[in-house]
């Protein structure tokens, strides 16, 4: 009977992207296993489109007193898994370890884990997840991300032609401190235009207040805010000469696609854990992003364009 493996990874988007290497490595190391992913609804379509998982299960992350969902979760965690690999490693998922069947190996940080993960202090999220799946039998492999860019949405929806640079000026609404000031992004867009690159704004509808403000201040920008899904975004960044933005999931995606990328990070980001990964990824960090000058960013951006 084929081995049954359950991987737990909820998100956020940047964390999911940093897990791409672990997902590929587990699939390559355990080619005959039935591998399932337990994640949250926003990442269902993305993960189903990959070739990493035999099935994608949705965790509602309900409260403990939601009896129906608690029983559903308990049933899911007892579906005959040989190994459960907790890549989320939160207090919530550590509690899940109490619900599994006897004999199931649990890879994680839960006190009753059969395979306790080591101290990962100072290790990036990507390397932590890789180390965890290697403990469970994975073989380190580079991820095949062609599934992200096979829909030709970019050509059909925008008609955009290179050369261009993608600017991602927004961030989580809960953490505006992660945003480099808009007036600096406007200076950056104008400098890119002068250098021969079409500045392109991107983001979801949630980001529109920020991108609309910038588009109004800089009419040189092509605003593609609200265009559909991560597959469009992947095609957009893959065709770009440069991607610049704050600490957000789309910048992690561009970096992992090995596009020249520059992430601007403030005190909210622990670079030792969460710096973007990719062959052409760069980042700059200041405790307060308003103290990061346009000149410093532009000089680094020019290096990334070389």
Image: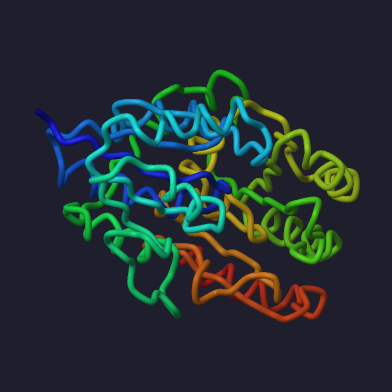
Q: Quadrant of residue 186?
A: bottom right
Residue that appears at 37% across and 59% down: 108
Instruction: Tell me which colouring the rendered structure shows.
Output: rainbow
- Residue 85 image offset from top left, x and y in percent: 33, 50
Q: Nearer the viewer, residue 119 or 191?
A: 119
Q: Nearer the viewer, residue 65 or 281?
A: 65
Above or below residue 15? Residue 288 is below
- Residue 103 image offset from top left, x and y in percent: 23, 46
Residue farthest to the front, as pictured: 102
Residue that appears at 80% across and 44% down: 211
Residue that appears at 68% across and 37% down: 65
Above or below residue 59? Residue 30 is below
Quadrant, the N terminus: top left
Q: Judge whether residue 161 can be spotted in this image.
A: no
Q: Nearer the viewer, residue 115 or 257?
A: 115
Q: Judge whether residue 291 can be spotted in this image.
A: yes
Residue farthest to the top, as pictured: 156
Residue that appears at 77% across and 33% down: 205
- Residue 3 image offset from top left, x and y in percent: 16, 36
Above or below residue 283? Residue 97 is above
- Residue 204 image offset from top left, x and y in percent: 71, 36
Number of numbered callouts drawn: 0
Q: Is residue 284 left or right of residue 207?
A: left
């Amino acid at each position: 009977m084929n081995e049954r493996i359950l991987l737990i990874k909820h998100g956020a988007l940047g964390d999911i992207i940093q897990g791409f290497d672990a997902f590929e490595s587990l699939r390559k190391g355990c080619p005959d296993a039935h591998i399932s992913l337990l994640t949250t609804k926003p990442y269902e379509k993305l993960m189903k489109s990959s070739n990493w998982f035999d099935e994608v299960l949705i965790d509602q992350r309900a409260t403990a007193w939601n009896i129906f969902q608690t029983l559903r979760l308990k049933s899911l965690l007892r579906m005959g898994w040989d190994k459960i690999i907790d890549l989320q490693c939160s207090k919530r998922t550590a509690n899940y370890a109490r619900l599994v069947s006897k004999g199931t190996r649990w890879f994680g940080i839960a006190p009753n884990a059969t395979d306790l993960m080591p101290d990962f202090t100072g290790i990036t999220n990507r390397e932590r997840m890789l180390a965890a799946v290697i403990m469970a039998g994975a073989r380190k492999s580079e991820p095949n991300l062609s599934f992200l860019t096979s829909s030709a949405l970019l050509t059909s929806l925008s008609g955009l032609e290179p050369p261009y640079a993608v600017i991602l000026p927004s961030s989580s609404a809960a953490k505006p401190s992660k945003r480099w000031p808009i007036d600096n992004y406007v200076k950056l867009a104008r400098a890119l235009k002068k250098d021969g690159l079409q500045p392109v704004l991107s983001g979801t509808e949630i980001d529109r207040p920020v991108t609309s403000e910038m588009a109004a201040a800089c009419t040189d920008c092509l605003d593609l805010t609200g265009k559909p899904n991560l597959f469009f975004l992947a095609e957009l960044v893959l065709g770009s000469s440069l991607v610049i933005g704050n600490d957000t999931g789309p910048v992690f995606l561009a970096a992992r696609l090995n596009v020249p990328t520059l992430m601007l990070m403030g005190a909210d980001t622990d670079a030792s854990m969460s710096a973007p990964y990719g062959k052409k990824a760069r980042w700059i960090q200041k405790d307060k992003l308003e103290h990061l000058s346009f000149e410093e960013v532009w000089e680094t951006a020019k290096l990334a364009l070389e």
